[in-house]
Image (cartoon, rainbow, N blue to C red):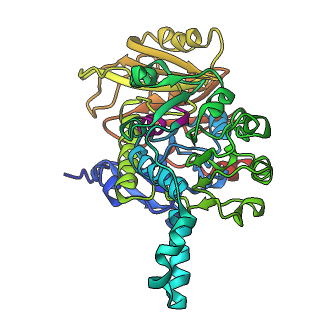
Amino acid sequence: MSLPNRTRFVVKTFNKISPGGLARFRPEMYRIKPSDAAPPVAHAILLRSHKIQDEDVPLTCRAIARCGAGTNNCNVPRMTELGVPVFNTPGANANAVKELVLCGLFLASRGIMQGAFKMDALHAEGTAHDQIEKVKAQFGGRELAGKTLGVVGLGAIGAAVLKAALDLKMDVIGFDPALSVEAALKLPGHRMTMVDSLEDLVAASDYVSLHAPAVDSTKGMISADVLKRAKKDVCLLNFARGELVDEAALSSFYDSGATGSYVCDFAVGPSLSARPNVVVLPHLGASTEEAEENAAAMAADTIQLFLETGTIRDSVNFPACALPARDEEMIHRVCVVTENRPGMLGELMSVFGGAGINVSQQINTSKGEIAYNVVDLELPRNADGKPELSSFKSFDELQAAIMELDGVKSSRLISDWCPGTGYAIKAGGEVIGIGVDSPEQESYAALAA
């Protein structure tokens, strides 16, 4: 049931987001506004491939969620500077990408595409029936069973590929210097081998499948030095990011006599595109209805959880954080984003203590330069259902005191009586948003101007 006298959260969308995912937003609490409607207020942004610019982000925006794993289109450093968490949906498309990687293994092994193109030509000539048995020898391949697959990156997708390869009776080697304990415990350790370097993995593999993010340390990871260790008939599969492969190095590898295939899901340059052993797909990895709906649903759930409770999960720039709800009439939750520096938490708590406000529970977590605080305040309500704030006349006054602290980036009251209000940011030393639902500047770009 909708509540007519109550504001709702506004979610601004870019790209075509799965309707099944958007349906997760409760209509009594949320309004969905496509970006082409140019909503001046948005409390969250949901996107797929759109490249975020400052003008896309209203000053009212609390969070950005990408329906997918990669966030290189979200300008994460800038959002971190502004104190805006960026979320992704790890694992939502894992099955779709895994299935395409399996397809890539077969494409790399059996001359399937080359044979199909040949048959197209023979049919056009009218000689297909006569020539089919004569030409098949040109496209002989090898079986996957008993061969070695090296998997680089053992997150949700890499782990799924690894397990599927084991079911195909392949031997599997894994490499992931950033592997978490949680992810490691999910691997079939007794059925696979872990190595300590990419070079060792490549040297032992008949097939190499890449599942690493595109960050400074991984760009061009398939380099000339790495390829020197590779078997001449190694097949390379890249369904992660095009930037992981040094195309010039791979082209030189083939020029030197290497015979393996390269199957990738991204456009390549001219040094590779004309080669018959290079198979390029149009970024099909997550392009299934199921994957798109899974990712949109996961992003929607994450955004709702954050806006309504302050909980952070699956953020690439903010620390994971969850504070259990206290189902008590006098409890009011405040979320504060600050710089991660010594003494910051004490300064924040002193604002509440100095006003005689009791903190019933709180949590402080940090990641890099960001610290995130969720604080439950014990406050009686007045006749209108709004909180009484002891020595402060209103939440605006309390928020102003919080925002005056050096190092505070943003603050918000999670309100059950007026969603979407009570948010303030600090930009260029100026506090914006206290007492207003929509600041004069519509976006961070307008603020900079």
Res 375 → quadrant = top left
Report the residue at 63% width, 18% height from top. 340
> Residue 147 at what x, y percent from top left?
50, 38
> Residue 62 at what x, y percent from top left?
51, 40
- Is 445 or 289 nearer to us in this picture? 289
Asked if residue 150 is among those painted magenta in the image, a careful observer would answer yes
Report the residue at 39% width, 37% height from top. 169
> Residue 35 at what x, y percent from top left?
52, 62
Q: Is residue 120 above or below residue 244?
A: below
Asked if residue 298 is among those painted magenta in the image, a careful observer would answer no
Report the residue at 67% width, 43% height from top. 244
- Residue ranking furthest to the left: 1
Report the residue at 24% width, 50% height from top. 3
Res 121 → quadrant = bottom right
- Is 110 or 323 nearer to us in this picture? 110
- Is 52 or 419 nearer to us in this picture? 52
Q: Which region is colored magenta?
A: 149-162
- Residue ranking furthest to the bottom: 126
Any part of residue 83 in sight:
yes
